[in-house]
Image: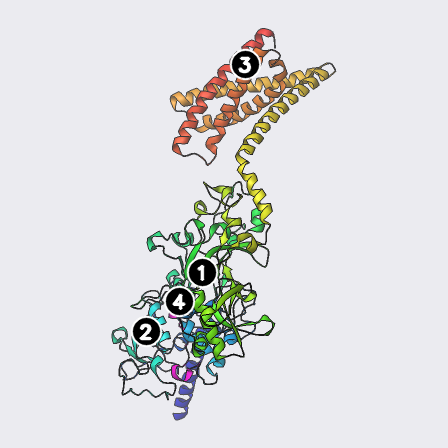
Amino acid sequence: MRTVSAILRASAAVAFAAAPFALTADHFNGGRTVPVHRLAPLDADGDKISPSAPLPEPISQAKTCAQCHDVHLMPGGTHFRTGLDTNDAPESVAVEPWFWIDEKMGTAIPLTLHGQPGAFRPADLGLSCWQWTKMFGRNFPGGGVGSDPRAVEEVAGARQRWFVTGPLGPNCLACHQQRGYDSSEWARQVLRENFAGAATAASGIGAVEGMNERLDDTWDGLRAENPDDHLFKVPEKTVYDLRQFDAKGRCVFDVGRPKSANCLACHAVSEAGVPSHSIAGDVHLQRGLTCVDCHKNGMDHRLTTTSCRECHAEANGAGPTPKHAGIPLVHFEKLSCTVCHSGVTRDGARAQVRTARANRIGIYGRAQWAADVPNVVEPVFVKNAEGLIEPHRMAWPSYFAELGTNDMVKPLSPETVAELGARGTNALTKAVVAGVLNALKAKAPESSFGFVGHGRLWTAEGEGTNATIVAREHAAAAPVSWPVGHDVRPARQARGAAPAKCADCHTSDSEFFFGKVVPTGPIVDAEVQPVQQTEFLGLSPTYHAVLGTTFAMRPIFKVFLWSVFGLLCLFAFAAAAVVLNRLGATISEGTLAFAWGFAKWIVDMGFVLSLLYLALSGVIGWMCGGMTGWWLVLHMVAGGCLAGSAALLAVFRAFDRTKKLGQGIFWLFWLVCAVGTVFTAVMPMMTVYGGDGQEFLLWSHRLFALAFAAVSGLVCRSCCRRGR
């Protein structure tokens, strides 16, 4: 009996151990609804949370979600890159950088985890992985550099406190929670260094008290109260909302596909100073699409983006195919779609924008989190590595720096500047910058210092009150930029749409080619040299000024060409009529005279019979409402025959009908009536006019047709009298 019990227990253990693998192998069974995620949350050790315990552990999203999902596939995903792997992302990828900001020191240093041009790696400035996590964890969903073992195992020092905070694990709810997620609470808890409980607090399942930020560097990790400060200078403590747990210790996680609001918490951009009701938003979101309809990923969380062309230009694209009527094809070879259709500024004008990542917008609370630094400008049109012009957001770096050999520039962190005796200010002037540079020089006389800002490198000359500051160009002061993808604007709001059309870009002084981009920075009295757009585009300003001038004459040129076209058509028509009549006269002198005359007779009879049926069916349909069924079908067939016969008559009979001036004028009137009849017949078939336009065309067709029938009858009568 004991043997059987042992076997049963062993079998149960094997089944339990295999259950997660059975679930994670393919947990989608064909159902079209998101299952209710009622489950027991787990802590970092994989143990079930006890919400009523005196000191309960915070929820580990990774362990909790791994009960059903392949969480182990997520490291290396787009939002979880660490910069510790050489294959994290290619260095040519231009994405929005992070910015190390200190407004009092005039600091805005662009940073990157994967070698983006124009930005520094954390190690270049001595930033540890822990410091990076605290500074920017507000805008990434945990994981990655916040919990990578290589990062957490950094040697203890002044710039890392892993032993106090622990890792910042993946926060699945940041993207997948459908309602009630508080991204501002996540940001607050990260900045308080409450890494473990930040996700729990943001989800609303519980609250987190205490501030790890206020604990000493010598904190031993024990969860004991601090005798001097029982409210803040204590380690984080999770307090669960017991109403959200059932009798089995389970709670419902309201999760699903990421909503656009989840994405915008970290990816929002808006024009500075614009009220919320003036923001139109992305046209795709207005039509019911969401961010993840175009930005997709699997369980590995590596994003793949559907391009504009895939949806709107390829044969099996899901979106409507744009007509781009009148736009030369060269535009689609040299411009990205975003040049005309993307941007958040009003009317696409260049303006300062603020982003969630750079300016901390979207974080709400008593404290004012948003900052104007760095000054991000949009749009600046730049030619990318593939030679395609695209709109960019652009920012100029600003920081105090140590100048090394070979004109190398090494940024100084705000803390380093302060340690060297410089004091920050809310309003940097050239005199203040010169004073700071001299203070730095006094503290470290063996070194040289400068200030990067406004697209220049500034250095001090002289000492004390006589110190002046001079600026020069330097590669380190070049701006950093990244492509604009959103907000996507509809066609009617696109660049080059009515009423401006071509003049949006093609004038001798257009903003697109000749607009002045002003480098920004913190020095309030700096003399700034604007940069013309053509420099970023790599184009000749002279050529485009001349090209733009030609567009001023474009309306006159169009009228001239259409006039010439009309005259040439008349001349060609007259010449063709003369040639064909001469050919007919030549042939009639030979053996084919009868055949030529018979062909003319066939055309005449086809015209007369078609005209008679059309007149009869048209009048009956008009007067009796009988233009339906076979009457309508035959009316359409006869209309085609009449149009073809009229065209042939216009060629075969033109010479005979224009020998005298009076006959020529009468023949011209016949042609005008024919053109009007055909035009008013075909235009209702085009998707141009609505109800009122269709009604107008119907009555116009009736009047033209009656006039055409009457004039044709007079022509036939005149011909019969002359025996022709």
Q: Nearer the viewer, mark 1 or mark 2?
A: 1
Could you tell me the amino acid type at mark 2?
Ala
Q: Are marks 2 and 3 in contact (CB under 8 Å)?
A: no
Tell which circle, 1 or 3, labels the residue nearer the N-terminal end. Answer: 1
Tell which circle, 4 or 1, labels the residue nearer the N-terminal end. Answer: 4
- The residue pinned by badge 1 equals 376
CA gap, disc 1 to disc 2?
Answer: 32 Å
Residue drawn at x 47%, y 83% is 153
Could you tell me the amino acid type at mark 1?
Val
Tell which circle, 1 or 2, labels the residue nearer the N-terminal end. Answer: 2
Q: Position of residue 536 (x, y in %)?
A: 55, 56
Answer left or right for 435 relative to 208: right
Q: Position of residue 567 (x, y in %)?
A: 59, 25
Q: Is residue 271 magenta?
A: no
Could you tell me the amino acid type at mark 4?
Cys
Residue drawn at x 65%, y 22% is 576
What stretch of residues is rendered in magenta?
Answer: 159-174
Q: Position of residue 335 (x, y in %)?
A: 55, 51
CA gap, disc 3 to disc 4?
Answer: 77 Å
Identify which residue, 366 or 59, lies in the foreground: 366
Q: Are marks 3 and 4 in contact (CB under 8 Å)?
A: no
Tell which circle, 4 or 2, labels the residue nearer the N-terminal end. Answer: 4
- Reply above or below: 523 against 406: above
Tell which circle, 2 or 3, labels the residue nearer the N-terminal end. Answer: 2
- Residue 360 seen by the camera: yes
- The residue pinned by badge 3 equals 666
Res 475 quadrant in image:
bottom right
Answer left or right for 425 relative to 97: left
CA gap, disc 2 to disc 3?
Answer: 89 Å
Q: Position of residue 50 (x, y in %)?
A: 30, 81
* Furthest residue toward top: 721
- The residue pinned by badge 2 equals 201
